[in-house]
Image (tube, grey):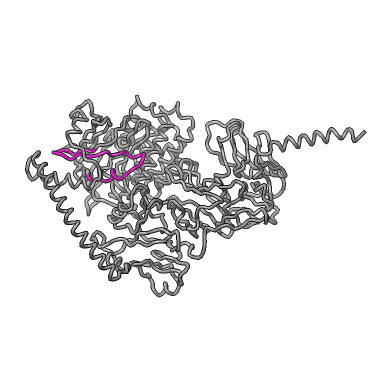
Amino acid sequence: MEAINVLPLLLISLLLTFLVTEATDIITANQTLKDGDTIVSKGGSFELGFFSPGGSRNRYLGIWYKKVSLQTVVWVANRDSPLYDLSGTLKVSENGSLRLFSGRDYIIWSSSSLEKPVVRNPIVQILDTGNLVVRNSGYDQDYIWQSLDYPGDTFLPGMKYGIDFSTGINRFLTSWISPDNPSTGNYTNKMDPSGVPQFFLKKNSVDVFRAGPWNGLRFTGMPHLKPNPIYRYEFVFTEEEVYYTYKLENPSVITRMQLNPNGALQRYTWVDSLQSWNFYLSAQMDSCDQYMLCGSYGSCNINESPACRCLKGFVPKSPEAYYAGDWSGGCVREVKMGCGKGEEDFLKISKLKLPDTRGSWYDMRMDLSECKRVCLRNCSCSAYSPFDIRDRGSGCILWFGDLIDIREYNENGQDLYVRLATSEIAKYKNYGVKGKMRIMLIIVFSTVLLLICLCICLTFCNMRKRKKLATIETSHRDLDRVSSRKQEEEDAELPFLDLEAIAEATSGFSDENKLGQGGFGPVYKGTLSCGQEIAVKRLSRTSRQGIEEFKNEIKLIAKLQHRNLVKILGYCVEEDERMLIYEYQPNKSLDSFIFVKERRKELDWPKRVEIIKGIARGLMYLHQDSRLRIIHRDLKASNVLLDSDMTPKISDFGLARTLGGDETEANTTRVVGTYGYMSPEYQIDGFFSLKSDVFSFGVLVLEIVSGRRNRGFCNQEHKLNLLGHAWRQYTEDKACELIDEALKESCTDVSEVLRAIHIGLLCVQQDPQDRPTMSVVVLMLSSDMLLLDPKEPGFYNERNLLYSDTTSINLEIPSKNFQTMSVIDPR
């Protein structure tokens, strides 16, 4: 009788157990996962639960392979906050945050969720990719959070191993301390986006191994990375993200990449017949992979003894130490070069791991011949190489400064063109008698061909000159102008549009087509005969922007390609006219919105924050990613144009200056710019740097948020400018009062606006060293990284209001006496 009564209870218990196991891959908001419970992915590949590694008694929440008999953990939640008993409980909050509680209900770990506009009925799910996700119920791909964005020591198939610039997430590996302790270890393998992106293995903060840049087929420091039957790999590099990933060719194969506690980055595959992990390959192959083993301009070859030697054309800096096995001092040029004298060329060295690219520059569109020309024109450029080696090569990488961390391979190495004196290059080209005869024939043939081409060119130029002289006056002034125009056309690498076509496009420069008046002259809207709309910047004949500024703007903008920079279409130098032709931006300039009361509401907060981010990305490109470091020197609201989608375009490069690849600052005796936007060190001492543009950007951010100009700003309580007012409001916890009234309806997240104000104040700090770089600014704007407290801004002093608008200036700073500054030409 008692057995009969117990039977229903056993049946109910079995039924409940069955129901629980049916939904083993999900935890809902009203459920918890306790120590001893697990959930398993739908296909049975991965399991989530609590475990103790090796001989440890500590408890951790982690993910491991379900089908592998040897427990192999691929991700740990609380790796630095272990539980010391079996009381751990995992829950998901209503806002989609995962929380791990101890027995006393202390939160010992929680996930950091991405900002989502709506979170409804969040659930936790373990996928067959090994990815633990939090998502809205009913939306399979709408992830609020995922574990693959925060990897531990294991690189799983399908994971994006790199940086998402839009969210600021950098996915990288960190080793365990030991097989018994998953706490954060000493080694990391992480993408460095500086220059050409590349992965670095570090021990604490010391570089240990560098994978080298991606060349279209593989990382140049991993020649053994080849197509294989187990997995296919891919490298993605766009403006939004850069990452490396791999996918399985056969889903039944189990493989992983792991950063071991000893710093070895190795791939393993599971062999079911042996019930063990089989070593497949290692990122580091031998001692030559030790970072910078052979010093600057040194190359490592594991098949040589000693392994280190100087590149051709270089000798040990300290021969005695170098030949004794101390290669840290590196190598120096055997013959010094005289830059600009035409006495340099490039020696091709093959089968190399390319040098460290953190101090490099790249252009994916440039061919190798143009790459050589650009490098040869810059005295700081030490070498170049194709960016992508597929299909005979494309793109360009330029190195500035010393070449470090190079090694030689027997196969799958890459070509590097190293700058040397021409006398040195000849030494390393071993010509025999036949080779010399062949070269002599080539020289003779080339000379004859050159003479023929020269005659043809002279004939053509003579005919063109006669045709031109038939249409213009034969005065010396006109002859000089024709010569100047030809030279500019050669330098600019831009289409030349004749005056007649531009006049027709703008209806004779009619007032109806006039868009506005800039510091250097009026701007007109026009329509070419092909139907393309253009904006014509017509330099005033009385403008102080001379031919040098005009040439500067042509040369700079012609070589810049970025969605947040204005695109130049052509130019005109004819009669007494000098004109630049740009793509037409229908929404004109930023100041026509934020400083005009009737139009402020057209720019709601979502649009304004995207404009701020776009300007930041454009500046980062100028400072870091363009062919040369470029300082704009006149960033202001009127020089930011808006296209039909309100995408910001930085314009007006007449005052811009370029720096060498390894330069970040310079000074001048001629200060040009706009009051209210110039940094203190530039306006007062003529000292400008990349941080000068950062200051201008900070001013612009505060103007965009407040809808008020910095120069001419007035407040009844004080005589501070906008920067000083913002600083005072920030220190008094009244920053909300700075926000433009027109933003109240569209600003749903005040914290985002306050963060923008905070970043703006960081950019306008008095000391340039305190200001962040634009790459850091972009990261701060796109992530939730912790911000430092800003220090006092520049020009934080009360003043008399002399002008109510911004004023562009052109100042001469006396070379001996810096006490006075005379205004040459106010704009």
* Residue 560 colored in magenta in the image: yes
Q: Please state the horizontal and vertical placement of residue 327, each as a whole percent of the image.
A: 43, 69
Foreground: 44 or 769? 44
- The residue that appears at 69% across and 43% down in the rendered structure is 38
Q: In which quarter of the image is the N terminus?
A: top right
Foreground: 308 or 123? 308
Question: Residue furthest toward the left?
Answer: 474
809 versus 600 height, above or below: below
Q: In which quarter of the image is residue 544?
A: top left
Q: Report how many numbered discs are placed on residues in the image.
A: 0
* Residue 769 colored in magenta in the image: no
**Residue 482 visible in rendering:** yes
Question: Residue furthest toward the top?
Answer: 598
**Residue 186 visible in rendering:** no
Foreground: 373 or 331? 373
Q: Please state the horizontal and vertical placement of residue 600, each as a whole percent of the image.
A: 37, 27
Q: On the picture, is 298 further left or further right than 115? A: left
Q: Please state the horizontal and vertical placement of residue 215, each as a whole percent of the image.
A: 43, 53
753 versus 787 height, above or below: above
Q: In which quarter of the image is residue 526?
A: top left
Q: In which quarter of the image is the C terminus?
A: top left
Q: Please state the horizontal and vertical placement of residue 86, each as a whole percent of the image.
A: 72, 46
Q: Which span of residues is magenta-colored?
A: 551-580
